[in-house]
Image: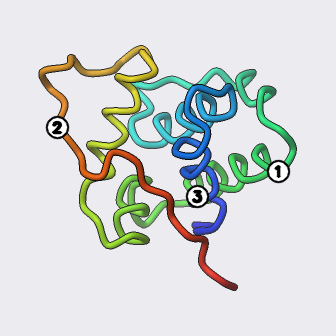
């Protein structure tokens, strides 16, 4: 997995909520988290700028090559947390993405927003 590309894609969802870039980043991450529930229309990638598109493609590419862990588990590992599955569910709910769970099925996460520092090469 390209950890920095994954972190940058995640950070878009945290730093720019409500923007088209954040929504597409969320859709990419959710489709890798649970593809049967969260379908990604590939034309959505057109809404990303060149750098963010490169990161999205890098993350998709890494996940497609025999992943050793699920996308939310990568983020858990990179941050030492255990709640990224719940964070994905909450983002799907907030953005009203088809396949989301009902509000009463969500679990609260603290803090609500997490910015992750990229790893130095």
Q: Which residue is mark 1?
A: 51
Describe the element under mark 2 as helix, strand or loop: loop
Judge left or right: residue 44 versus residue 96. Answer: right
What's the CA distance linking mark 2 and mark 3? Answer: 23 Å
- Depth order, front residue of 110/46: 110
Rendered residue at 33%/43% (across/down): 87
Residue 36, given in percent of the width and then of the height, sits at 40, 26
Q: Which numbered disc, 2 or 3, marks the residue that appears first in the sequence?
A: 3
Q: Which residue is mark 3?
A: 6
Rendered residue at 68%/25% (across/down): 20
Judge left or right: residue 54 versus residue 82. Answer: right
What's the CA distance linking mark 1 and mark 3? Answer: 12 Å
Rendered residue at 57%/60% (across/down): 7
Residue 22, given in percent of the width and then of the height, sits at 61, 34
Q: Nearer the viewer, mark 2 or mark 3?
A: 2
Mark 1 packing: few (<14 Cα in 10 Å), some, or many (20+)?
few
On residue 43, the disc is none
- Depth order, front residue of 73/52: 52
């Amino acid at each position: 997995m390209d950890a920095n590309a994954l972190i940058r894609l995640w950070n878009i969802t945290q730093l720019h909520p409500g923007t088209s870039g954040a929504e597409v980043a969320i859709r990419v991450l959710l489709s890798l988290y649970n593809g049967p529930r969260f379908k990604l229309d590939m034309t959505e990638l057109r809404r990303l700028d060149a750098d963010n598109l490169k990161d999205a493609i890098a993350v998709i590419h890494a996940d497609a090559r025999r992943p050793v862990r699920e996308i939310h588990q990568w983020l858990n590992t990179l941050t030492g947390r255990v709640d990224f599955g719940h964070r994905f569910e909450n983002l799907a709910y907030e953005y009203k993405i088809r396949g989301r769970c009902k509000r009463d099925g969500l679990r609260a996460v603290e803090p609500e927003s997490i910015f992750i520092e990229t790893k130095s090469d």
